[in-house]
Amino acid sequence: MKYLNIGAVKIEKTAALAPMASVADRAFREMCKRFGAAYVVGEMASSKGLFYSDRKTQELLTVTQAEQPMAVQLFGDDPDFMARAAVKCLEYAPQVIDINMGCPVPKVAGSGSGSALMKTPELAEQITKAMVRAVDIPVTVKIRKGWDDQSVNAVDFAKRMEQCGVSAITVHGRTRQQMYTPPVDTDIIRQVKEAVKVPVIGNGDVTDVQTCIDMYEKTGCDLVMIGRGAYGKPWLFEQIRQYFETGKSMEEPDLEQRMNIMLEHIKLICEYKGEYIGMKEARKHAAWYLKGLHGAASLRRDCGTLSSYEDIEKLVCKALAQEIH
């Protein structure tokens, strides 16, 4: 197995789980780690929310032994707040702190944070320098191709981040304007990789073993990061890991195995968040696990009414029965 280092943190060169708000929570991260994810990044947390001791923000920064190596991720647009938040993050014992400079959603970018920082590279530099100075663990950054097609600046931006002292750079190969379509631009990730000496992590459109291999080959990146491609299939990380270990990857789990994995995942969500909140959040995950099954449209409609763990057990029985018939 090959490895890369983010600072002193050693990581298998297989696949990592991307930070995804309202998806990559503790339960999902633990499932992905069980199935071989090399590295996980927590949901983005507000630097100001952390500074003002917002309870929800603190929950987003929880790091467990089972998830390591793990990074927590911060967003914000104020260098002082970001630096102070980074120091506060150390209380949760992450191994890496990641700066979100890629989130495209209006709530984040509209406030000058996330991908909006790609329009203000000088401010991005101030934030990064302040955070690197403030903590003694690696600081990384996640960026996009640029803000829009008229301002594709990932290469210059990455060079700036390297000069500020970051230990790795993740590049999502689309502009903010493109959100999650069209297909990811692997060439911009390759250009960033060739322009800097720190590890570069490639992100976007990795949905199976082959697209992971393609990302490595087309970009030369040091690690592949998977986001939406892992929805409803945490076993993807094990498939990728097995490929790099043996040259072959495990088969897709059969329906019964898939349903058991879903039940295990949803049980964890309920354990960590309580059944009431857990089952509300489980609805989207269940719909992803059921995608592509016989009668999936009907099953996925049922997901919208899940309110107890007993409900999901009944839904699994229905899914298994439909597949038999």
Image (cartoon, rainbow, N blue to C red):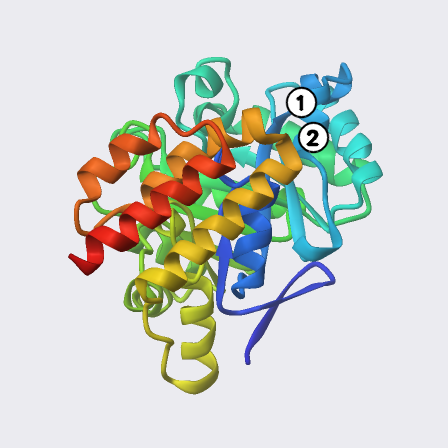
Indicate left or right for 11 with 93 as reference. left
43 with respect to 320 (left or right):
right
Q: Position of residue 49 (x, y in %)?
A: 68, 18
Residue at which label 1 appears: 56
Report the residue marked by disc 2: 59
Q: Residue at 36% of width from left, 25% of height from top?
A: 305
Q: Do the residues labelled 2 and 1 touch (CB within 8 Å)?
A: yes
Residue 190: which disc?
none
Q: Position of residue 195 (x, y in %)?
A: 45, 56
Q: How many labels does the image show?
A: 2
Identify the residue shown where x is 48% and y is 82%. 245
Residue 286 occupies quadrant: top left
User: Which three-letter amino acid code belongs to the residue tagged 1?
Assistant: Lys
**Would you place residue 59 above or below residue 25 in this image?**
above
Check disc 2 and report its element: helix, strand or loop.
helix
Residue 204 % position (x, y): 35, 49
Q: In this view, does 187 lie above or below 94?
A: below
In terms of depth relative to the viewer, which is nearer, 303 or 139?
Answer: 303
Name the residue: 36% across, 48% down.
316
Q: Is residue 165 visible?
A: yes
For the question of whether residue 182 can be seen, the reply is no
Residue 67 as seen in the image, left or right of residue 144: right
Which quadrant of the rendered structure holds the C terminus? bottom left
